[in-house]
Amino acid sequence: MESNRQKKIAGVLQQDLAEILQGAARSGGMQNLLISVTQVKVTVDLSIAKVYLSIFPKEKSLELMEGISSNAPLIKHELAQRTRDQLRRVPSLEFFIDDSLEYIDQIERSLKRVDNPIDNPDMLPRRKKS
């Protein structure tokens, strides 16, 4: 369970990261691209922030995630400049793709019988045996 401090820091980080990433995409000349920070989770010791991003269109998500992850120190520096009056230390940033919307869409298609996994069991993801 998250403490109030963790929730407040996550909220500040989420808002500022969204502005930083959207600004970088616009200044980089990327057209027809939407980057949204869907969730930020901060560890109990406030040293690591897990940032979940939703990127549209999906085809560009892996390429953009590589670029964002490689530029994490620059993003952290920009974030530190923006939050210097609110936070003493900015947590280390770890970026992940948030695929929850895609998962919800898959469930809706299954319920509407568009892609029915009962009729076609090959659609179900196979469990990997370790």
Image: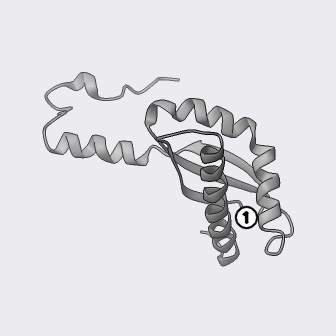
Q: Tell me where residue 63 appears, x and y as whole percent.
A: 58, 29
Q: Residue at x 37, y 42 (%)?
A: 102
**Which image quadrant is residue 20 in?**
bottom right
Above or below, 114 relative to 21: above
- Could you say where residue 120 lies in the image, as x and y percent from the top left? 18, 25
Q: Mark 1 packing: few (<14 Cα in 10 Å), some, or many (20+)?
A: few
- Horizontally, residue 54 falls left or right of residue 14, namely left
Which of the 4 image quarters holds residue 47?
bottom right
| Residue 90 in view here | no
The image quadrant where one finds the N terminus is: bottom right
Residue at screen point 14% across, 43% down: 112
Left or right: 102, with 84 as reference point: left
| Residue type of the residue flagged with mark 1 | Val
Q: How is the image coloured?
A: one colour
Q: Nearer the viewer, residue 22 or 91?
A: 22
Most distant residue in the bottom direction: 4
Residue at 63%, 71% in the rendered image:
7
Residue to which mark 1 is pinned: 44
Q: Is residue 100 left or right of residue 93?
A: left
Expressed as whole percent of the image width and height from the top left, the position of residue 118 reads: 16, 32
Label 1 secondary element: loop
- Regarding residue 26, the answer to whether it shows in the image is yes
